[in-house]
Amino acid sequence: MNNTWVEISKSALLHNIASIKTIIQPCVKLMAVVKANAYGHGLTQVGEIAADYTDGLAVINLDEARLLRQKEIHAPILVLGYISENEDDLAWAIRERIEIAVNSLSHAQRLSKIIKHSSYGSDSLRLHIKIDTGMGRMGILTSNAVDYVKQISELPNLAIKGIMSHFADAVGHREYAQEQLKRFEDIKFQLYRQSVQDNGSGASGSQDWVWHMAKTEAILDFPQSHLDAVRLGIGLYGLWPNIKLIDRVHALHPEFELKPVLSWKTRILQVKDYPEGEYVGYGCTHKTHRQTRIAILPAGYYEGYDRGLSNKGDVLIGGKRCPIIGRICMNMCMVDATGVKEVKRGDEAVLIGAQGREYISADEIAKKIDTVHYEVVARINPKIERIITE
Ligand SMILES: *Cc1c(COP(=O)(O)O)cnc(C)c1O
Protein backbone atom coordinates (compact mmCIF):
# COMPACT_ATOMS: atom_id res chain seq x y z
CA MET A 1 0.00 0.00 0.00
CA ASN A 2 2.69 2.48 -1.01
CA ASN A 3 0.16 5.08 -2.11
CA THR A 4 -1.00 5.50 1.46
CA TRP A 5 1.06 5.57 4.64
CA VAL A 6 1.01 6.68 8.25
CA GLU A 7 3.68 8.97 9.69
CA ILE A 8 4.54 8.81 13.38
CA SER A 9 6.25 11.86 14.83
CA LYS A 10 8.95 10.74 17.22
CA SER A 11 9.37 14.23 18.66
CA ALA A 12 5.63 14.48 19.40
CA LEU A 13 5.69 11.09 21.11
CA LEU A 14 8.67 12.08 23.27
CA HIS A 15 7.05 15.43 24.01
CA ASN A 16 3.89 13.73 25.28
CA ILE A 17 5.82 11.34 27.51
CA ALA A 18 7.89 14.19 28.94
CA SER A 19 4.75 16.31 29.50
CA ILE A 20 2.97 13.52 31.34
CA LYS A 21 6.03 13.03 33.54
CA THR A 22 5.75 16.64 34.66
CA ILE A 23 2.31 15.98 36.15
CA ILE A 24 2.95 12.65 37.89
CA GLN A 25 5.17 12.22 40.93
CA PRO A 26 8.65 10.88 40.12
CA CYS A 27 7.98 7.75 42.17
CA VAL A 28 4.91 6.84 40.07
CA LYS A 29 5.73 4.33 37.33
CA LEU A 30 4.61 5.20 33.79
CA MET A 31 3.25 2.38 31.64
CA ALA A 32 2.78 3.05 27.92
CA VAL A 33 -0.35 1.34 26.57
CA VAL A 34 0.52 0.14 23.06
CA LYS A 35 -2.33 -2.34 22.67
CA ALA A 36 -4.30 -2.62 19.43
CA ASN A 37 -1.27 -1.88 17.26
CA ALA A 38 -0.52 1.14 19.47
CA TYR A 39 -3.97 2.57 18.84
CA GLY A 40 -3.30 2.16 15.14
CA HIS A 41 0.03 4.01 15.35
CA GLY A 42 2.21 0.90 14.83
CA LEU A 43 3.00 -1.44 17.71
CA THR A 44 6.72 -1.97 17.20
CA GLN A 45 7.39 1.56 15.95
CA VAL A 46 5.83 3.12 19.04
CA GLY A 47 6.96 0.30 21.34
CA GLU A 48 10.63 0.74 20.46
CA ILE A 49 10.55 4.42 21.34
CA ALA A 50 8.25 4.21 24.37
CA ALA A 51 10.24 1.34 25.91
CA ASP A 52 13.24 3.63 26.33
CA TYR A 53 11.35 6.44 28.04
CA THR A 54 8.77 4.67 30.23
CA ASP A 55 8.75 1.90 32.83
CA GLY A 56 6.95 -0.68 30.72
CA LEU A 57 4.49 -1.43 27.93
CA ALA A 58 0.94 -2.79 27.99
CA VAL A 59 -0.47 -4.85 25.11
CA ILE A 60 -3.70 -6.74 24.51
CA ASN A 61 -2.46 -10.30 23.87
CA LEU A 62 0.58 -12.55 23.58
CA ASP A 63 0.84 -11.97 19.83
CA GLU A 64 1.55 -8.32 20.47
CA ALA A 65 3.98 -9.22 23.27
CA ARG A 66 5.81 -11.55 20.84
CA LEU A 67 6.14 -8.87 18.18
CA LEU A 68 7.77 -6.58 20.73
CA ARG A 69 10.20 -9.22 22.00
CA GLN A 70 11.08 -10.13 18.40
CA LYS A 71 12.22 -6.52 18.01
CA GLU A 72 14.55 -6.99 20.97
CA ILE A 73 12.42 -4.80 23.17
CA HIS A 74 13.22 -6.05 26.68
CA ALA A 75 11.02 -3.70 28.71
CA PRO A 76 8.44 -5.16 31.11
CA ILE A 77 5.27 -6.07 29.19
CA LEU A 78 1.82 -6.43 30.71
CA VAL A 79 -0.85 -8.29 28.73
CA LEU A 80 -4.17 -6.57 29.50
CA GLY A 81 -6.48 -8.90 27.62
CA TYR A 82 -7.08 -12.61 27.66
CA ILE A 83 -4.38 -15.15 26.82
CA SER A 84 -4.62 -18.69 25.57
CA GLU A 85 -4.19 -21.33 28.27
CA ASN A 86 -1.75 -23.31 26.24
CA GLU A 87 1.39 -24.77 27.84
CA ASP A 88 3.80 -23.57 25.21
CA ASP A 89 2.45 -20.04 25.31
CA LEU A 90 2.70 -19.94 29.08
CA ALA A 91 6.24 -21.32 28.98
CA TRP A 92 7.15 -18.58 26.54
CA ALA A 93 5.51 -15.92 28.73
CA ILE A 94 7.47 -17.11 31.77
CA ARG A 95 10.74 -17.22 29.87
CA GLU A 96 10.21 -13.76 28.41
CA ARG A 97 9.02 -12.30 31.75
CA ILE A 98 5.66 -11.31 30.27
CA GLU A 99 3.18 -10.20 32.93
CA ILE A 100 -0.40 -11.37 32.59
CA ALA A 101 -3.65 -9.79 33.81
CA VAL A 102 -5.62 -12.39 35.77
CA ASN A 103 -9.37 -11.94 35.90
CA SER A 104 -10.72 -14.45 38.38
CA LEU A 105 -9.72 -17.00 40.99
CA SER A 106 -10.50 -19.88 38.63
CA HIS A 107 -8.40 -18.26 35.90
CA ALA A 108 -5.41 -18.16 38.26
CA GLN A 109 -6.07 -21.74 39.38
CA ARG A 110 -6.11 -22.98 35.79
CA LEU A 111 -2.86 -21.16 34.97
CA SER A 112 -1.17 -22.52 38.09
CA LYS A 113 -2.23 -26.04 37.22
CA ILE A 114 -1.10 -25.92 33.60
CA ILE A 115 2.32 -24.69 34.69
CA LYS A 116 2.59 -27.30 37.43
CA HIS A 117 2.10 -30.10 34.96
CA SER A 118 5.05 -29.20 32.83
CA SER A 119 8.68 -28.39 33.39
CA TYR A 120 9.42 -24.71 33.69
CA GLY A 121 12.23 -24.87 36.16
CA SER A 122 11.65 -22.76 39.21
CA ASP A 123 10.40 -19.65 37.49
CA SER A 124 6.84 -18.44 37.96
CA LEU A 125 4.28 -16.74 35.76
CA ARG A 126 4.06 -13.05 36.63
CA LEU A 127 0.57 -11.77 37.33
CA HIS A 128 -1.37 -8.60 37.82
CA ILE A 129 -4.71 -9.34 39.44
CA LYS A 130 -7.56 -7.36 37.98
CA ILE A 131 -10.23 -6.13 40.38
CA ASP A 132 -13.58 -4.97 39.02
CA THR A 133 -14.32 -1.99 41.27
CA GLY A 134 -17.24 -0.85 39.09
CA MET A 135 -16.43 -1.12 35.41
CA GLY A 136 -18.43 -4.28 34.83
CA ARG A 137 -15.77 -5.76 32.58
CA MET A 138 -12.96 -8.18 33.47
CA GLY A 139 -11.88 -8.77 37.02
CA ILE A 140 -12.69 -10.04 40.49
CA LEU A 141 -15.60 -8.29 42.18
CA THR A 142 -14.73 -6.01 45.07
CA SER A 143 -16.62 -8.16 47.56
CA ASN A 144 -14.43 -11.20 46.79
CA ALA A 145 -11.19 -9.39 46.21
CA VAL A 146 -9.39 -9.74 49.56
CA ASP A 147 -10.23 -13.41 49.88
CA TYR A 148 -9.41 -14.33 46.27
CA VAL A 149 -6.20 -12.34 46.11
CA LYS A 150 -4.98 -14.18 49.20
CA GLN A 151 -5.91 -17.51 47.65
CA ILE A 152 -4.15 -16.61 44.40
CA SER A 153 -1.05 -15.56 46.34
CA GLU A 154 -0.85 -19.06 47.76
CA LEU A 155 -1.04 -20.86 44.40
CA PRO A 156 2.20 -22.43 43.18
CA ASN A 157 4.04 -21.24 40.06
CA LEU A 158 2.48 -17.79 40.11
CA ALA A 159 4.12 -14.55 41.24
CA ILE A 160 1.92 -11.55 41.88
CA LYS A 161 3.52 -8.38 40.56
CA GLY A 162 0.61 -6.01 40.71
CA ILE A 163 -3.04 -5.37 41.43
CA MET A 164 -5.03 -3.32 38.97
CA SER A 165 -8.45 -1.84 38.38
CA HIS A 166 -10.03 0.34 35.70
CA PHE A 167 -12.25 3.44 35.84
CA ALA A 168 -15.55 3.58 33.97
CA ASP A 169 -15.49 7.40 33.78
CA ALA A 170 -13.01 9.29 35.91
CA VAL A 171 -14.07 12.72 34.64
CA GLY A 172 -17.79 12.73 33.85
CA HIS A 173 -18.77 10.63 36.87
CA ARG A 174 -16.26 11.78 39.45
CA GLU A 175 -18.21 10.61 42.50
CA TYR A 176 -18.47 7.13 41.05
CA ALA A 177 -14.77 7.18 40.24
CA GLN A 178 -14.03 8.25 43.80
CA GLU A 179 -16.06 5.30 45.02
CA GLN A 180 -14.13 2.97 42.69
CA LEU A 181 -10.85 4.33 44.03
CA LYS A 182 -12.03 3.98 47.63
CA ARG A 183 -12.95 0.33 47.06
CA PHE A 184 -9.55 -0.32 45.54
CA GLU A 185 -7.71 1.36 48.40
CA ASP A 186 -9.80 -0.50 50.98
CA ILE A 187 -8.74 -3.78 49.41
CA LYS A 188 -5.13 -2.67 49.54
CA PHE A 189 -5.45 -1.64 53.19
CA GLN A 190 -7.07 -4.91 54.24
CA LEU A 191 -4.50 -7.04 52.43
CA TYR A 192 -1.68 -4.99 53.88
CA ARG A 193 -3.06 -5.25 57.41
CA GLN A 194 -3.50 -9.00 57.11
CA SER A 195 -0.03 -9.52 55.70
CA VAL A 196 1.40 -7.60 58.65
CA GLN A 197 -0.67 -9.67 61.08
CA ASP A 198 0.34 -12.89 59.34
CA ASN A 199 3.90 -11.69 59.67
CA GLY A 200 4.75 -12.40 56.09
CA SER A 201 2.80 -15.57 55.51
CA GLY A 202 -0.41 -15.60 53.49
CA ALA A 203 -0.36 -12.72 51.03
CA SER A 204 3.36 -12.40 51.54
CA GLY A 205 5.38 -9.91 49.60
CA SER A 206 2.24 -7.85 49.16
CA GLN A 207 4.17 -4.73 50.14
CA ASP A 208 5.98 -4.97 46.80
CA TRP A 209 2.91 -5.24 44.65
CA VAL A 210 2.34 -2.42 42.20
CA TRP A 211 -1.16 -0.94 42.54
CA HIS A 212 -2.43 0.80 39.44
CA MET A 213 -5.70 2.17 38.19
CA ALA A 214 -5.33 5.44 36.27
CA LYS A 215 -5.70 5.74 32.48
CA THR A 216 -5.10 9.01 30.63
CA GLU A 217 -8.11 10.99 31.88
CA ALA A 218 -7.34 10.06 35.49
CA ILE A 219 -3.63 10.82 34.95
CA LEU A 220 -4.58 14.31 33.77
CA ASP A 221 -7.36 15.14 36.19
CA PHE A 222 -7.45 12.78 39.18
CA PRO A 223 -4.02 12.75 40.82
CA GLN A 224 -5.21 10.88 43.92
CA SER A 225 -5.68 7.85 41.68
CA HIS A 226 -2.07 7.67 40.46
CA LEU A 227 -1.04 5.21 43.22
CA ASP A 228 2.12 3.24 42.28
CA ALA A 229 1.78 3.33 38.49
CA VAL A 230 -0.35 4.82 35.72
CA ARG A 231 -1.37 3.40 32.34
CA LEU A 232 -1.03 6.01 29.62
CA GLY A 233 -2.94 5.23 26.42
CA ILE A 234 -4.58 7.94 24.33
CA GLY A 235 -2.48 10.75 25.84
CA LEU A 236 0.70 9.05 24.65
CA TYR A 237 -0.57 9.61 21.12
CA GLY A 238 -1.22 13.28 21.79
CA LEU A 239 -5.00 13.05 21.90
CA TRP A 240 -7.12 14.40 24.76
CA PRO A 241 -9.42 11.71 26.14
CA ASN A 242 -12.05 14.33 26.77
CA ILE A 243 -12.18 17.88 25.43
CA LYS A 244 -13.58 19.15 28.75
CA LEU A 245 -10.25 18.32 30.34
CA ILE A 246 -8.21 20.84 28.37
CA ASP A 247 -9.29 23.87 30.42
CA ARG A 248 -9.16 21.99 33.70
CA VAL A 249 -5.61 20.79 33.09
CA HIS A 250 -4.49 24.22 31.90
CA ALA A 251 -5.82 25.82 35.08
CA LEU A 252 -3.27 23.79 37.05
CA HIS A 253 -0.55 23.37 34.41
CA PRO A 254 -0.69 26.34 32.00
CA GLU A 255 2.20 25.04 29.89
CA PHE A 256 0.84 21.54 29.46
CA GLU A 257 0.30 20.47 25.89
CA LEU A 258 -0.26 17.23 23.98
CA LYS A 259 0.93 16.88 20.41
CA PRO A 260 -0.83 14.51 18.02
CA VAL A 261 1.62 11.85 16.89
CA LEU A 262 -0.07 10.41 13.81
CA SER A 263 -0.59 11.72 10.28
CA TRP A 264 -2.28 9.69 7.57
CA LYS A 265 -1.31 10.53 4.01
CA THR A 266 -2.04 9.31 0.49
CA ARG A 267 -1.07 10.17 -3.08
CA ILE A 268 -3.70 11.11 -5.65
CA LEU A 269 -4.30 8.28 -8.16
CA GLN A 270 -6.05 10.29 -10.84
CA VAL A 271 -7.34 13.81 -11.47
CA LYS A 272 -10.11 14.62 -13.95
CA ASP A 273 -12.48 17.38 -14.89
CA TYR A 274 -15.92 15.90 -14.53
CA PRO A 275 -18.90 17.57 -16.21
CA GLU A 276 -21.79 19.32 -14.51
CA GLY A 277 -24.93 17.30 -13.80
CA GLU A 278 -23.27 13.89 -13.46
CA TYR A 279 -23.35 11.54 -10.51
CA VAL A 280 -20.28 10.56 -8.51
CA GLY A 281 -19.86 7.14 -6.91
CA TYR A 282 -21.99 4.18 -5.87
CA GLY A 283 -25.62 4.90 -5.17
CA CYS A 284 -25.50 8.22 -7.06
CA THR A 285 -25.44 10.16 -3.79
CA HIS A 286 -23.63 13.22 -5.17
CA LYS A 287 -24.53 15.13 -8.37
CA THR A 288 -22.14 17.76 -9.70
CA HIS A 289 -23.68 21.23 -9.85
CA ARG A 290 -20.75 22.61 -11.85
CA GLN A 291 -17.81 21.20 -13.72
CA THR A 292 -15.82 19.50 -10.96
CA ARG A 293 -12.17 18.59 -10.69
CA ILE A 294 -12.26 15.19 -9.05
CA ALA A 295 -9.21 13.69 -7.31
CA ILE A 296 -9.32 9.97 -6.61
CA LEU A 297 -7.52 8.75 -3.49
CA PRO A 298 -6.38 5.21 -2.58
CA ALA A 299 -8.18 5.05 0.76
CA GLY A 300 -11.49 3.38 1.43
CA TYR A 301 -13.18 1.59 4.25
CA TYR A 302 -10.83 -1.41 3.93
CA GLU A 303 -7.94 0.92 4.69
CA GLY A 304 -9.90 2.16 7.69
CA TYR A 305 -11.31 5.35 6.17
CA ASP A 306 -14.83 5.10 7.51
CA ARG A 307 -17.70 4.86 5.05
CA GLY A 308 -19.63 7.24 7.30
CA LEU A 309 -17.41 9.99 5.88
CA SER A 310 -19.21 9.68 2.50
CA ASN A 311 -20.28 13.22 1.47
CA LYS A 312 -19.11 14.45 4.90
CA GLY A 313 -15.36 14.21 5.31
CA ASP A 314 -12.65 16.60 4.15
CA VAL A 315 -9.09 15.91 3.06
CA LEU A 316 -6.22 18.36 2.54
CA ILE A 317 -4.69 18.88 -0.89
CA GLY A 318 -2.39 21.80 -1.70
CA GLY A 319 -3.06 23.16 1.79
CA LYS A 320 -6.81 23.40 1.11
CA ARG A 321 -9.79 21.53 2.44
CA CYS A 322 -11.43 19.38 -0.23
CA PRO A 323 -14.76 17.67 0.49
CA ILE A 324 -15.36 13.96 -0.06
CA ILE A 325 -18.00 13.56 -2.75
CA GLY A 326 -20.07 10.43 -3.20
CA ARG A 327 -19.73 7.29 -1.17
CA ILE A 328 -16.42 6.04 0.18
CA CYS A 329 -15.63 2.81 -1.71
CA MET A 330 -13.82 -0.27 -0.40
CA ASN A 331 -10.35 0.93 -1.43
CA MET A 332 -10.88 4.42 -2.85
CA CYS A 333 -12.67 7.69 -2.38
CA MET A 334 -13.31 10.77 -4.50
CA VAL A 335 -12.84 14.38 -3.48
CA ASP A 336 -13.76 17.71 -5.04
CA ALA A 337 -10.42 19.40 -5.67
CA THR A 338 -11.80 22.16 -7.90
CA GLY A 339 -10.46 24.83 -5.55
CA VAL A 340 -6.87 23.58 -5.69
CA LYS A 341 -4.58 25.15 -8.27
CA GLU A 342 -2.60 22.82 -10.51
CA VAL A 343 -3.61 19.67 -8.67
CA LYS A 344 -2.17 16.59 -10.35
CA ARG A 345 -1.74 12.85 -10.03
CA GLY A 346 0.84 11.92 -7.39
CA ASP A 347 0.18 14.98 -5.21
CA GLU A 348 -0.04 14.35 -1.50
CA ALA A 349 -3.46 14.30 0.14
CA VAL A 350 -3.73 14.34 3.93
CA LEU A 351 -6.55 12.39 5.58
CA ILE A 352 -5.44 13.10 9.17
CA GLY A 353 -2.85 15.71 10.07
CA ALA A 354 -1.52 19.04 8.89
CA GLN A 355 -0.88 20.52 5.47
CA GLY A 356 -0.06 24.20 5.04
CA ARG A 357 -2.16 26.05 7.59
CA GLU A 358 -4.95 23.50 7.62
CA TYR A 359 -5.36 20.63 10.01
CA ILE A 360 -7.69 17.63 10.15
CA SER A 361 -7.78 15.97 13.56
CA ALA A 362 -8.88 12.45 14.41
CA ASP A 363 -11.38 14.18 16.68
CA GLU A 364 -12.95 16.06 13.75
CA ILE A 365 -13.45 12.78 11.91
CA ALA A 366 -14.80 11.08 15.04
CA LYS A 367 -17.46 13.78 15.49
CA LYS A 368 -18.59 13.43 11.88
CA ILE A 369 -19.15 9.71 12.22
CA ASP A 370 -20.43 9.83 15.79
CA THR A 371 -17.62 7.95 17.49
CA VAL A 372 -14.43 8.67 19.46
CA HIS A 373 -10.97 9.44 18.07
CA TYR A 374 -9.72 6.22 19.70
CA GLU A 375 -11.70 4.29 17.09
CA VAL A 376 -10.66 6.50 14.17
CA VAL A 377 -6.94 5.87 14.68
CA ALA A 378 -7.20 2.29 15.97
CA ARG A 379 -8.99 1.18 12.81
CA ILE A 380 -6.39 2.32 10.32
CA ASN A 381 -5.52 -0.91 8.55
CA PRO A 382 -2.40 -2.41 10.17
CA LYS A 383 -1.03 -3.36 6.73
CA ILE A 384 -0.50 0.31 5.92
CA GLU A 385 3.12 1.21 6.55
CA ARG A 386 3.95 3.23 9.70
CA ILE A 387 6.94 5.46 9.13
CA ILE A 388 8.75 7.23 11.96
CA THR A 389 9.58 10.86 11.23
CA GLU A 390 11.44 13.32 13.45
C1 LIG B 1 -6.81 0.82 27.05
C2 LIG B 1 -6.56 0.78 28.49
C3 LIG B 1 -5.91 1.84 29.15
C4 LIG B 1 -5.54 3.15 28.46
O1 LIG B 1 -6.66 4.02 28.41
P1 LIG B 1 -6.53 5.48 27.79
O2 LIG B 1 -7.84 6.12 28.03
O3 LIG B 1 -6.27 5.30 26.34
O4 LIG B 1 -5.40 6.15 28.49
C5 LIG B 1 -5.61 1.67 30.48
N1 LIG B 1 -5.95 0.54 31.14
C6 LIG B 1 -6.59 -0.48 30.55
C7 LIG B 1 -6.94 -1.68 31.32
C8 LIG B 1 -6.93 -0.39 29.21
O5 LIG B 1 -7.58 -1.40 28.64
Image (tube, rainbow, N blue to C red):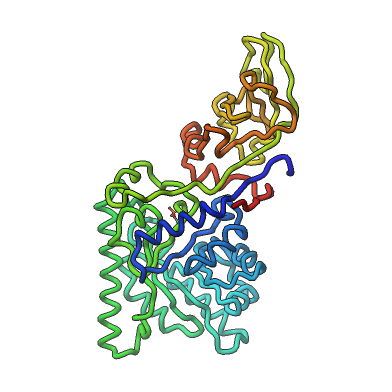
Would you identify the image quadrant in which residue 292 lies? top right
Q: Which residue is painted at 44% across and 71% down in the image? A: 128
Q: Which residue is painted at 48% across and 66% down in the image? A: 54
Measuring from the top left, give residue 330's x and y in whole percent.
68, 34
Q: Which image quarter has ligand 1?
A: bottom left
Measuring from the top left, give residue 258's x and y in whole percent.
43, 49
Vertical side of 280 occupied by 32: above or below: below
Q: Nearer the viewer, residue 84 or 39?
A: 39
Q: Nearer the viewer, residue 371 or 7?
A: 7
Image position of 109 (left or right of 174):
right
Image position of 316 (left or right of 195):
right
Would you identify the image quadrant in which residue 115 lies? bottom right
Q: Nearer the viewer, residue 329 or 187?
A: 329
Measuring from the top left, give residue 80's x and y in whole percent.
49, 63
Measuring from the top left, give residue 123's x and y in whole percent.
55, 85
Q: How many marks?
A: 0
Vertical side of 240 occupied by 198: above or below: below
Image position of 313 (left or right of 270):
left
Q: Which residue is painted at 60% across and 62% down in the image? A: 64
Vertical side of 90 occupied by 330: above or below: above
Image position of 138 (left or right of 339):
left
Q: Nearer the viewer, residue 239 or 218?
A: 239
Quarter of the picture holding the N terminus: top right
Q: Which residue is painted at 34% across and 55% down in the image? A: 218
